[in-house]
Amino acid sequence: MTGLNTQRMEANVVVLGTDNVGKSALIVRFLTRRFIGEYGDIESLYSHSVVVDRREQTLNIWDAPYSQSQQDMSYGSLMCEKRVQWADGFVLVYSICDRASFNAVTRLIHTIKTSKEFLGFEKMPIVIVGNKRDLDHRRTVLSEEGRLLALSADCHFYEVSAAENYHSVLMVFHGLVNCIRESRVSVKKLAGIKGIVKSMSAVFTRRRTDSL
């Protein structure tokens, strides 16, 4: 492909959401351009290459099951830590027709951010996706609510219909790729600044020692 940057990047993406929000349909639409409506609650891992801004990116996508059982809280916490350790970014999916699934995304953001801080990670790239836009007549979650949640959590927000539109689904994953790239650049810059400060501190310490 002419003008393609040959530097391949790789990123791990976890897709989360409650049952029947269409997260598996969203992933398969992205991978194959096709819509398949029926899925079991099966944990899956996919690998897929895309070109974003003329750079090839390999995405490892973990279609992760969601558990809200109170008796699985300790297990759920461990699983979240495992996902945060593995992930470079998250796609959190709710149905615009299901208020409970939207509330679950709010909880997931809190859990991810808490785990991230506990594990000492920098900002975790997250995109929030309101799916089933084609069922607007059954909507119970307003677009403005999704945007406000994303704004308060410093995330990106998309409303899509996995059933009807491939391009909007593509934009979700392209948007996440850009967030991951920006996050990596920020981490490198921060590491560079810390390195400079550490070097300067060492120099000043030596000078003070030499002057004694």
Image: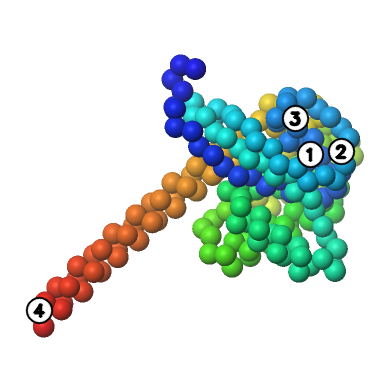
Which label is found at residue 24?
1
Residue displayed at 69% across by 37% down? 46
* Residue 42 visible in image: yes
- For the residue marked with disc 1, what is the amino acid? Ser
Residue located beneath label 4 in the image: 211
Residue appearing at x 23%, y 65% in the figure? 200
Disc 3 residue crowd, few under 14, some 14–19, many 20+, Cα 10 Å:
many
Q: Which residue is mark 3?
A: 29
Asked where in the image residue 100 lies, by quadrant, the reply is: bottom right
Q: CA distance from mark 4 to mark 1?
A: 66 Å
Residue 128 x/y as whole percent: 69, 46
Disc on the earlier residue, 2 or 1: 1
- The residue indicated by pointer 2 is 39
**Where does the image place residue 210, in percent across and percent down from the top left?**
11, 77
Residue drawn at 61 percent across, 37 percent down: 59
For residue 37, side relative to residue 130 (left or right): right
Q: Amino acid at mark 2?
A: Tyr
Please determine whether, in this image, residue 61 is positioned above or below residue 105: above
Disc 2 to disc 1, C-alpha distance: 7 Å
How crowded pointer 1 is (Cα within 10 Å; few <14, some 14-19, many 20+) is rated as many
Lower position in the chain sequence, tag 3 or tag 1: 1
Q: CA distance from mark 2 to mark 3?
A: 13 Å
First in sequence, mark 4 or 1: give its number: 1
Is 205 located above or below residue 114 in the figure? below
